[in-house]
């Protein structure tokens, strides 16, 4: 009797040769970082003193999502560790995703755990259970006993609940917390106005050097995807597929992550359809799927009323496509209608305002303040940053399940 699994699984992938190259968290080699030579060079200059065991400059990097900020920061830090070793300097770097580790305690625990070598230091860094001050004390001991220089990358720094860890890290040497180790901080933010809300003392010590990463243009996006085209088997990509994906991504956002996502999804669509090539017409379908999956991930775990508020904004956006944003009172009216249709009691206007602020924090919507003069006073307008069709589809799908 033949093995049933023979027909169930494909042993050889006809489309992808090395799909890992199209994963967002994949750190490409030097030759694959495209369109960021100037930024890499500037960042390397800022941290260059570290290879001689001296204090690197603290750096703040701004730029929209998918402009290569994290990629370049990790790459430069990795190269610094290697070069410092050649100079006889013991260096390392720690990476913190502040969207995940939002509190001071979580962030300092992540740093201490990632740079620790328990077998050498004898210091344990448990996941939880210690006070923030104890985590700091252990971190300072680890740094002084193991390293000459340490770089700490705080990605999405604007997601931190407060500036306390920035104060501690940027002033650790000056305050005598560490004696032998030099510390440098690379802060990364998607919000260029982030610095405006920083504590003045933190700003003076953290913002020694600032860099802005612009969005990628169509040529750079094409080069980025070309550099990863060996993720596919030879001859599988139609010549027009990458240029089409690059043009689409450049026109909409200049986001390399989304562009790579689109390319990966186009390959998966070809796979599912049994096509022998990844054709240009798969790119449009892939773009819709990439946007849908990304938005679905953004709202995963959100409450029903959080979704009703977004649904209200999507409905308004689709029925008033020329309008750039809607007042809170208008969003609330539509939200109340949705609640009635769902058989649910609506929340207060104040609570809905809070939900809208949460969505703005996640960059799902954009809020802007306006003045209506003495007659109306000031008011806030809310505008979806996501495709309203995608938002409506995903939220309807959530209501159905």
Image (cartoon, rainbow, N blue to C red):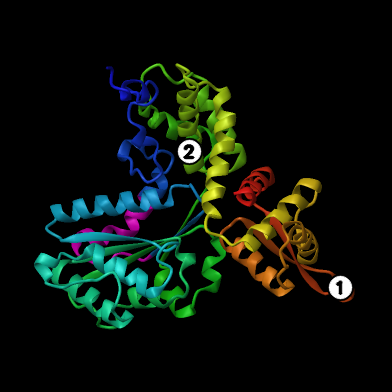
Say whether residue 387 is left or right of residue 213: right
Disc 1, SS = helix
| In this view, 238 is above or below 179 | above
Q: Residue 315 magenta-drawn?
A: no
On residue 400, the disc is none
Coordinates of residue 242 in the picture (x, y in percent): 50, 27
- Give me the residue at 53% from left, 39% from top: 290
Disc 2, SS = helix
Say whether residue 214 is left or right of residue 397: left
Query: Gap in Å between the C-alphas at discs 1 and 2?
Result: 45 Å
Whether residue 158 is visible = yes
| In this view, 19 is above or below 278 | below
Image quadrant assignment for residue 371: bottom right
Coordinates of residue 258 in the picture (x, y in percent): 51, 41
Badge 1 crowding class, 10 Å Cα cut-off, few under 14, some 14 to 19, many 20 or more, is few
Q: Residue 46 magenta-drawn?
A: yes
Image quarter where the N terminus lies is top left
Q: Name the residue under label 2.
A: 261
Coordinates of residue 86 in the picture (x, y in percent): 14, 52
| In this view, 225 is above or below 4 | below
Image quadrant assignment for residue 14: top left
Badge 2 crowding class, 10 Å Cα cut-off, few under 14, some 14 to 19, many 20 or more, is many
Q: What stretch is highlighted in magenta?
A: 41-58
Point out the residue furthest to the left here.
120
> Which SS type dominates the magenta stretch?
helix
Q: Nearer the viewer, mark 1 or mark 2?
A: 2
Say which of 376 and 303 sits in front.
303
Q: Mark 1 points at which residue?
A: 376
Which badge, 1 or 2, is on the more N-terminal residue? 2
- Give me the residue at 75% from left, 57% from top: 338
């Amino acid at each position: 009797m033949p093995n049933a699994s023979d027909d169930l699984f494909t042993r050889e992938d006809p489309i992808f040769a090395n799909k890992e190259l199209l994963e967002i968290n994949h750190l490409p080699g030097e030759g694959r970082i495209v369109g960021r030579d100037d930024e890499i060079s500037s960042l390397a200059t800022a941290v260059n003193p570290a290879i001689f065991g001296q204090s690197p400059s603290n750096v703040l990097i701004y730029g929209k999502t998918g402009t290569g900020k994290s990629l370049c920061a990790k790459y430069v830090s990795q190269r610094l560790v290697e070069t410092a070793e050649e100079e006889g300097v013991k260096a390392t770097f720690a990476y913190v995703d502040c969207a995940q580790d939002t509190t001071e305690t979580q962030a300092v625990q992540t740093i201490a755990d990632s740079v620790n070598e328990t077998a050498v230091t004898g210091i344990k860094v448990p996941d939880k259970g210690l006070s923030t001050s104890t985590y700091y004390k252990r971190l300072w001991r680890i740094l002084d006993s193991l390293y000459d220089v340490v770089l700490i990358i705080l990605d999405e720094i604007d997601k931190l609940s407060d500036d306390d860890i920035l104060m501690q890290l940027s002033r650790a040497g000056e305050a005598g917390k560490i004696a032998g180790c030099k510390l440098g901080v690379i802060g990364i933010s998607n919000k260029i106005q982030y610095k405006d809300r920083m504590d003045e003392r933190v700003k003076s010590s953290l913002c020694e050097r600032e860099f802005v990463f612009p969005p990628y243009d169509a040529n750079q996006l094409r080069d980025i995807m070309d550099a990863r085209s060996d993720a596919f088997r030879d001859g599988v990509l139609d010549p027009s597929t990458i240029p089409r994906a690059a043009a689409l991504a450049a026109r909409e956002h200049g986001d390399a992550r989304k562009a790579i996502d689109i390319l990966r999804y186009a390959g998966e669509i070809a796979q599912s359809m049994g096509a022998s090539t990844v054709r240009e017409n798969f790119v449009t379908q892939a773009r819709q799927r990439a946007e849908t999956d990304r938005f679905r991930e953004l709202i995963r775990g959100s409450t029903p009323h959080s979704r009703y508020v977004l649904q209200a904004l999507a409905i308004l956006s689709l029925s008033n496509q020329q309008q750039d944003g809607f007042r809170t009172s208008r969003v609330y009216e539509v939200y109340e209608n949705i609640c009635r249709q769902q058989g649910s009691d609506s929340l207060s206007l104040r609570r809905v305002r809070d939900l809208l602020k949460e969505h703005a924090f996640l960059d799902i919507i954009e809020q802007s303040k306006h003045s209506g003069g003495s007659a109306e006073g000031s008011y806030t307008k809310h505008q979806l940053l996501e495709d309203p069709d995608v938002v409506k589809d995903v939220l309807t799908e959530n209501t159905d399940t």
